[in-house]
Amino acid sequence: MANTIHTTLGETEYFPGIGRIRYEGPDTDNPLAYRFYDESRVVAGKTMREHFKFAVAYWHTLCGTGGDPFGPGTKAFPWLRATDPVQQAKDKMDAAFEFITKLGLPYYCFHDFDLIAEGDTLAESERRLHTIGDYARAKMAASGVRLLWGTANLFSHPRYMNGAATNPDFAALVQAGAQVKMALDLTIALGGENYVFWGGREGYQSLLNTDMKRELDHMARFLDAAKDYARKNGFTGNFFIEPKPMDPSKHQYDFDCATVIGFLREYGLDKDFKLNVEVNHATLALHSFQHELQVAANAGMLGSIDANRGDYQNGWDTDQFPNNVYEITEAMLVILEAGGLQGGGVNFDAKTRRNSTDPDDLFHAHIGGIDVFARALLAADAILEKSAYRQLRRERYASFDSGEGQAFEKGQLSLENLAEIARRNGEPAQRSGKQEMFENLLNRFV
Ligand code: XUL
Ligand code: CO
């Protein structure tokens, strides 16, 4: 294969000619360098490395060969060549750790069967996950790379066509249970810091054949059982739900952050579960990313981020790498003001385009996304520390800081009191929202 060479150690190098990606500053001409991500630079009391906890998503970066509904994959990744599943999984993991360490990133994330192909039986799958788990543990120890989160793929196999935890057939639900148990075991064994649930097929294609209430009850029971099992087995990390409104199902129950927060509270799961907010899922729900972050932050549930972007023209989940500094600066403002992410980090749930077929395209994609976040962090920190942004926003609410406004906030005024004050005060003076000025303020710092 043109783009692999064998090193003197006999181990294949999958990205020859690419060394450790380093910070070289904004003026460098080197496309394989960071311009803004300086991992040890301290911003707002933390290093950039600590702020972001950047993670490589195994499914897109190592497994995604560019197939779409109109044609097969285009990327002949050399690490996928072996036909023996265990050998293929080890090759893929060698490539993964070479890639992650060359980028200098601290974390990765996976679904169970991203790591190794599912077996024909649960016992065979479990054997395979043990084998690749041992291999991963050694790789992680040697490199210092850690597991940000693990998850189970409960949406690809045909048995989940009617859902996993919300499947109307108990026989399918128990398969999902067995799979989550194995994925939790693996996550715990690898010191995974969090565990994610994305309900790809937890929803419906038609309400006509669906008992929504019963399915939601089942989903809550399932999450509760998974949580109890993990806690009993020593897992101290966070459970995250990843909202998404649709695709592949017509309607997913975890539609958006507000819906998930309501669900978690209704079923008493809000102490153990937080949210993993994905950019393109937010926009599919017709929200902005920053809106979804703010909703999660308001509930104290802003756990982690799946970084990517959608497309302004296309209404589906294009999962492109982030490249919009203005948008991510708005996001970083929310994250910084919320005091950071709770337990999670920034996972690049993003894929290079189908016609980006060179091995170095994976590097360009990640470097670009990483630098967008770094630049946005610097801008957001400057906006908060050096501009009048916070003060200007606070001043809009100044009438609640004292007197009757404050009494209202404290719950001391009845509706009759409000009516009385209105009559006494008369029509309020007009006060501009100054939106364009706020927008310009942000633009000044990006
Ligand atoms: C799909 C998606 C998933 C989750 C993990 O839209 O975002 O890859 O992040 O299951
Ligand atoms: Co995601």
Image (cartoon, rainbow, N blue to C red):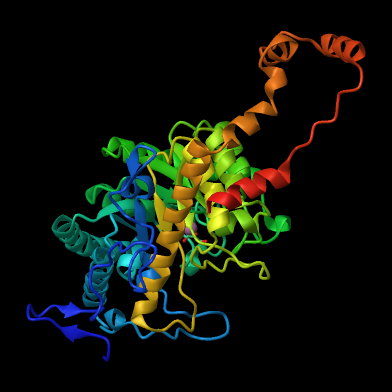
Residue 124 shows up from this direction: yes
At horizontal 31% and vertical 37% (from top left) the residue drawn is 236
At horizontal 22% and vertical 71% (from top left) the residue drawn is 94
Residue 215 shows up from this direction: no
Location of the N terminus by quadrant is bottom left
> Picture coordinates of residue 160 (x, y %)?
50, 62
> Picture coordinates of residue 70 (x, y %)?
57, 84
Which quarter of the figure has residue 327? bottom right
At horizontal 62% and vertical 41% (from top left) the residue drawn is 258
- How many numbered dots are placed on residues in this image? 0
Q: Nearer the viewer, residue 400 or 293?
A: 400
**Name of the residue lying farthest toward the left:** 9
**Name of the residue lying farthest toward the bottom:** 2
Q: Nearer the viewer, residue 331 or 316?
A: 331
**144 sits to left or right of 65:** left
Which quarter of the figure has residue 119? bottom left
> Picture coordinates of residue 155 (x, y %)?
49, 63
**177 sits to left or right of 207:** left
At horizontal 35% and vertical 64% (from top left) the residue drawn is 34
Residue 237 vertical placement versus 118 (above, below): above
Residue 292 vertical placement versus 157 (above, below): above
Residue 237 vertical placement versus 347 (above, below): above
> Picture coordinates of residue 159 (x, y %)?
48, 65
